[in-house]
Amino acid sequence: MFDRRGRFGALAARPHGGGPAPVPFAPSDLFAAGQPGHWPGGYDPTQARLWQTASGVVARVTAVGQQVGIVPDRSQGGALGPELSAAEYTISTANQPVHTAAVEGLYRFDMEIVSGDGRARQQGTQPAIAGALSFAPSILEADVIARPGSLLRINTNAASGLVCRPTLRLIAGNHASQEVALSRPTLRQVSGKWCLEADGIDDSLSVTLPSGTYGRAWVSAAGVVTVDTVTDPVNALIPSAVGALQADVILRQGAFSPTEEAQIRAYWGGLYA
Amino acid sequence: MPDQIRITIACPAALIQDANQLARVIGYSEADDQTYGAAIWQDAAGNRYAVASGLVSPVFPEAAVSPLTAPEWGADMAAAARAQALIRIGGPAAPGQIAAVIGDDVPAALAELGLTRIESI
């Protein structure tokens, strides 16, 4: 539904009259010059691969009431890096190495279990995280955070003959996450709008950005937009009140210009008002 | 039984290190030893606490008082045991106890614990 720059497909530029219509604004335009930042593009779990890791097991966020441990950043378009996995493994060990992470980041680690007896799953060692063990044939999704030195591997209870086809690629962007179980926000839906609820106690979403002054904008589920600046932001969950509802947020290095602020307000006004 | 329940826990300032080791033991990863942060809450007598609140498995309260097993990522088990011995379900918060309130309503849990945020911090 979204195009590469984060616009709804139906709103993308198209011929109009004697010439092309103006290209509608999308928040990804704020990062067009490569500015660092964070923009999740909302929290609709059917549009974004949000992840809960409540029990140390990778699982997609799919429903209201679930904790959100990883929020991908779309400010850089979610581009995937080079393939880091071999095309296929025929397993002969309990832990089949795929790649040792050289850089910290969020890795797309999807896998098809093609054939063979036994179960398998994707696994990372730093932090310790794993998917759910599954039999062939199956297709498993996982986006996992890995720190340098983390061994990304296939874990299995099959001694031999299990054929797996993983794909492992670094996802560009400054993704937000929360490793502390009790500090994860909760997915909510209010009047059809997907949002994150903060408990007002300790919930936060850590994001690592270069130091500097950032323009910061966030919109509540009720459509209220707040714009300001912040120095060296480390949290992508902005509201701190009990039960606060965040529908989207933008952090962009450099304060927003008046024109940019007006564009942000108009964009979110069309989605959340 | 619900998939998850909310628990709100008040940890006295002097017990934060031990309580974080307990969280490391009964939590889901080594990162859970950051569960209790700054002691920015206080009771009516001015005693300070760190507060954590979040969704946990319905078996969490039982697991929290069960015999502890060292996690694969390691932990200070003596510190965790000291903290475990001080757990109490229900408010109000008290300096020598780690009080936990179960319930979805966070403001109500804070009221039962008798805690307010220290605004000046």
Image (spheres, rainbow, N blue to C red):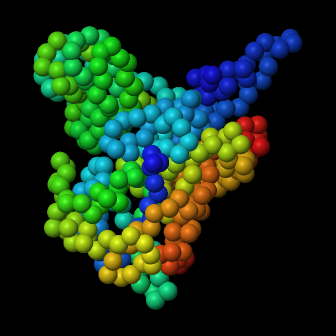
In this view of the protein, which residue sits in the foreground, A192 or A74? A192
Q: Is residue A112 left or right of residue B101?
A: left
Placement of A18 over or under A57, stated as above or below:
above
**Residue at left 17%, top 12%?**
A161
Residue A173 placement (x, y as % from top left)? 46, 35
Residue A80 placement (x, y as % from top left)? 42, 24
**Residue at left 45%, top 63%?**
B102
**Residue at left 24%, top 60%?**
B66
In this view of the protein, which residue sits in the foreground, A172 or B85? B85
Residue A190 placement (x, y as % from top left)? 67, 45
Examine the rendering and report whether any part of residue B60 can be seen: yes
Which quadrant would the N terminus of chain A be assigned to in this image?
Answer: top right
Q: Is residue A132 left or right of residue A248?
A: left
Examine the rendering and report whether any part of residue B38 can be seen: no
Q: Picture quarter containing residue A139?
A: top left
Residue B89 placement (x, y as % from top left)? 38, 70
Badge count: 0
Which quadrant would the C terminus of chain A be assigned to in this image?
Answer: top right
In this view of the protein, which residue sits in the foreground, A45 or B63? B63
- The furthest residue to the right: A17
In this view of the protein, which residue sits in the foreground, B1 or A102? B1
